Image (cartoon, coloured by chain):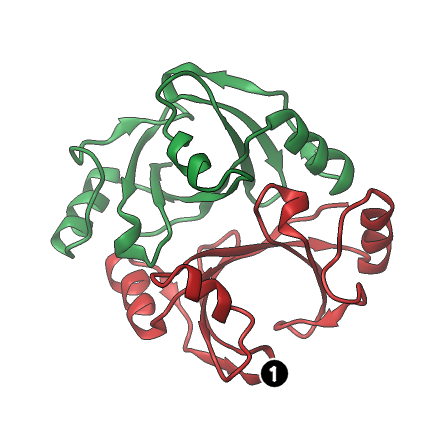
Chain colours: A green, B red
Amino acid sequence: MLGRLNHVALAVPDLAAATAAYRDTLGARVSAPQALPEHGVTVVFVDVGNTKIELLEPLGEDSPIAAFLEKNPSGGMHHVCYEVDDILAARDHLKASGARVLGDADPKIGAHGKPVLFLHPKDFFGTLVELEQA
Amino acid sequence: MLGRLNHVALAVPDLAAATAAYRDTLGARVSAPQALPEHGVTVVFVDVGNTKIELLEPLGEDSPIAAFLEKNPSGGMHHVCYEVDDILAARDHLKASGARVLGDADPKIGAHGKPVLFLHPKDFFGTLVELEQA
């Protein structure tokens, strides 16, 4: 079921400073910032060849990463996203296995325009897992 | 400078349970556990095609992930590892950029038998970054 790693999301309090660190200090290829108001984040994509790192800064009042940054003011690793071929089949298998899907368990359209689900970190040893239909 | 994502390391308190969750609940391909006493961890590799996820459980008295699991008893995302072509050139560039290399800044032989360095998470917005010479 589990496909390739689509991205690793890192929450950062200052996207411009984080982008500079990845570009200048680590020598990575970074995108221009993209505001995604419907997802409550501004994102910079770091292209590392085999996958991407997403630097996320809160945008707007109800950012889904605001609580994380309150707990981790310097930033930190927020979630990992894996691709699946069929997100409804994946969801049904996960629920049958006892894993908790966040929200109402209906896939939402994620930041890449594709259906996504998030799984409860308590079922995956403290790691927030996103699944995206590839 | 920054090459491909070699792995994402997840610290877990119970490697057998975490392996079962990745294999059975997420449907991922997992390796047999490998004890690495010189690195203070037992590791299971989760092959996701384009990179790998490493599930790490503490091994022995001085495990480098023991303090992390004391702070995060359920487990969590521990570090990301990127490949570089020349770890000494990478280190010198990083130091010249003001980034802090952990320890004495001499590369050590990592869990894959290759030279590695770790960078201070405060310089990378709360994310512990490992560099491995590919």
Q: At 71% from the left edge and 31% from the top edge, which residue is drawn?
A: A20
Name the spot of residue B72 as percent of width and height, x first. Answer: 40, 59
Name the spot of residue B21 as percent of width and height, x first. Answer: 28, 63
Query: Label 1: which residue?
Result: B38
Horizontally, is A102 left or right of A116 in the view? left
Q: Which chain carries label 1?
A: B
Q: How many labels does the image show?
A: 1
In this view of the protein, which residue sits in the foreground, B105 or A128? B105
In this view of the protein, which residue sits in the foreground, A132 or B75? B75
Horizontally, is A113 left or right of B122 in the view? left
Q: At 50% from the left edge and 67% from the top edge, which residue is drawn?
A: B67
Give the vertical position of B100 relative to A40 (above or below).
Answer: below
Q: In which quarter of the image is residue A19?
A: top right
Label 1 sits on a secondary structure element that is helix
Residue at the left extreme, as displayed: A96
Asked if one can make out residue B134 in the rendered structure from this viewpoint, the answer is no
Horizontally, is B107 left or right of B38 in the view? right
Name the spot of residue B79 as percent of width and height, x first. Answer: 55, 56
Q: At 19% from the left edge and 47% from the top edge, which residue is drawn?
A: A100
Q: In which quarter of the image is residue B19?
A: bottom left
In this view of the protein, which residue sits in the foreground, B30 or B34? B34
The amino acid type of the residue labelled 1 equals: Glu
